[in-house]
Amino acid sequence: MKIVHSAAALEGLLRQYREEGKSVGFVPTMGALHEGHAALVRRCAAENGVCAASIFVNPAQFDNPEDLRLYPRTPEGDCVLLEEVGADIVFVPSEEEVYPVPDNRVFDFGLSGRVMEGACRPGHFDGVARVVSRLFDLVKPHRAYFGEKDFQQLVLVRRLVEMLQLPVEIVAVATVREPDGLAMSSRNRRLTAEQRVCAAEIFHILRESLLQAEKLSPDGVIRFVTGAVNNVPELRVEYFNIVDGLTLQPVTSWRGPGNIVGAIAVYCGEVRLIDNIRYR
Ligand code: PAF
């Protein structure tokens, strides 16, 4: 596995692989890697001639400076894991390498960008879109892999690819969970032992809400989930929305075309966690 820090070195390496006729798969990450990332890289390595990953904690997507400061950074361990699970290239750029000139682009994702994470973290998806489009420009992947845990991000990255007409296929990979159901996240390592136990309740309650959805309306399920999560010590719901899986707009009935997803953001102490569940 090759570790490169400059855009020029990355492009040189990828050129060689392209000349050999290999398809390029790409997994962008912010590091602090866990089994969820490992699943993305394994799939990427299995489906492409070359698997490139990046590690870059992107300041542009953090609306909260404290969250950026506390974001876990474990580059050595990350590279060990990436090599084990089949990455061929790891791009670990500096901020200057990613943004050689200031990038102030603002992206209009319509109403889908203004709900949930878009509403709670102003500017977050502009930051994600800036870095993802810039990384795609450098890597020029045939396929790029994103986790379903960041459900709204996945939908908006697909939209970004359409808007910019980028020749990349976005591949969604299922959320990887701890044995007790907690969705894997780099932020989990900031939880205390007691908070970690409470955090597992988020998915237990989401799973129980599948049964509630057989008898309650979407609004009833929202009340059930919000009440149950807020009753768990340490947990505080920021939002729980039940939305159309494509438009991300709230649904008021279980009927109608398309899929329906419940997406939640919860503070566990000071740590913000997100998860989601599919109802249909
Ligand atoms: O999901 C993430 O880790 C980040 O949002 C991403 C896609 C790597 C962009 O910084």
Image: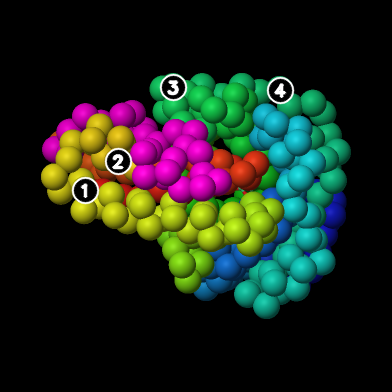
The numbered disc on residue 224 is 2
Q: CA distance from mark 3 to mark 2?
A: 29 Å
Residue 26 position by quadrant: bottom right
Towards the viewer: 224 or 13: 224
Q: Position of residue 75 (x, y in %)?
A: 80, 61
- Say above or below: 260 vs 178: above
In the picture, which quadrant includes the N terminus?
bottom right
Residue type at mark 1: give it. Answer: Gln
Q: Residue at x 48, y 58 (%)?
A: 200
Q: Within the magenta stretch, is there residue 241? A: yes
Give neighbour class at mark 4: few <14, some 14-19, many 20+ (Cα, 10 Å). few
Q: CA distance from mark 4 to mark 2?
A: 40 Å
Q: Nearer the viewer, mark 1 or mark 4?
A: 1
Q: Where does label 3 land, which residue?
A: 110
Q: Residue at x 75, y 40 (%)?
A: 68
Which segment is the magenta one? 226-255
10 with respect to 38 (left or right): right
Q: Residues at badges 1 and 4 in contact (C-beta under 8 Å)?
A: no
The numbered disc on residue 104 is 4
Give neighbour class at mark 1: few <14, some 14-19, many 20+ (Cα, 10 Å). some
Q: Residues at badges 4 and 2 in contact (C-beta under 8 Å)?
A: no
Q: Secondary structure at mark 2?
A: helix
